[in-house]
Image (cartoon, grey):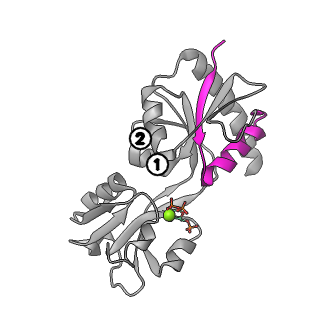
Amino acid sequence: MSKLKIAVQKSGRLNEDSMKILKAIGISIDNGKDQLKASARNFPLEVFYLRNGDIPQYLRDGVVDAAIIGENVLIEKGNDLNIVERLGFSKCRVSIAVPKSSDAKSIKDLEGKRIATSYPNTVNQFLEKAGIKANLHIINGSVEIAPNIGLADAVCDIVSSGSTLFKNGLKEIDKLLNSEAVLATSPRISDDNQALIDKIQFRLKSVLRGRE
Ligand code: PRP
Ligand code: MG
């Protein structure tokens, strides 16, 4: 029998709620915490614990059939991939922020400025739409420190509670997009595994309806 391979964030903010929602739809995972792969006891499914940023490529290549992933990561790295269901958790936004003392009020005020971000494709799209040319500095974490160390005039990163911005003396001036966890599938998924996804989706819909 075929088994569905589903990617879940290895560690980080999505991991816990991703495992919780699998549990909520009646799938119990044998969890050796340190393993990169685990099997479900009562559903033909294997979970692969992967790095967020790697998941879109694994989906595209068909290495995994599906993933629970932040929509912001899909927009940045996988705009060609199919979203099956929005999962209602890990809600956040991708926003531009500047030092509190800055006069900039929106992305339109960033002409010629340096923007630090882990989301270059997303920022570039919005810069283009606004007709603004800025210089991107791509960093993979702790982006909000960049203005304080003189590396950038602005940042673009995920905002959830806003506490990271606050602690770094930054203010949000423009929201590029909203994001939440989604279930996405590979374009190369087999018919058998698509049928398993359909089952999972059916269960998800009833759990999500109950949460409304
Ligand atoms: C994420 C994100 C923001 C912060 C937003 O960083 O990159 O910095 O969370 O959350 P908040 O608005 O609730 O403060 P994370 O702590 O995951 O670390 P990283 O940037 O080093 O990956
Ligand atoms: Mg951060």
Between marks 2 and 1, how big is the CA–CA gap? 7 Å
- Picture quarter containing residue 26? top right
Q: Residue at x 35, y 78 (%)?
A: 105
Asked if marks 2 and 1 touch (Cβ < 8 Å), the reply is: yes
Residue 77 rendering spot, x and y as whole percentages: 40, 44
Residue lying furthest front = 34
The type of residue carrying mark 2 is: Gly
Query: Quick check: can you spot residue 108?
Result: yes
- Residues packed near mark 1 inside 10 Å, few (<14), some (14 to 19) or many (20 plus): many
Residue 190: within the magenta?
A: no
Quadrant location of the N terminus in the rendered image: top right
Q: Nearer the viewer, residue 65 or 126?
A: 65
Identify whether 133 is placed above or below 85.
below
Please provide percent x and percent y for residue 125. Answer: 30, 54
Circle 1: element type: helix
The residue that disc 2 covers is: 78
**Residue type at mark 1?**
Val
Q: Quadrant of residue 41?
A: top right
Q: Is residue 95 visible?
A: no
Q: How many marks?
A: 2
Residue 167 or residue 126, whichever sits in front: 167
Instruction: Write down the residue under mark 1.
Output: 73
Horizontally, residue 46 falls left or right of residue 189, namely right
Is residue 9 inside the magenta stretch?
Answer: yes
Residue 144 in which image quadrant: bottom left
Specify start and end residues of the magenta stretch as a single range.
1-29
Residue 14 position within the rendered picture, expressed as x and y whole percent measured from the top left: 61, 50
Residue at point 33%, 80% (across, down): 104
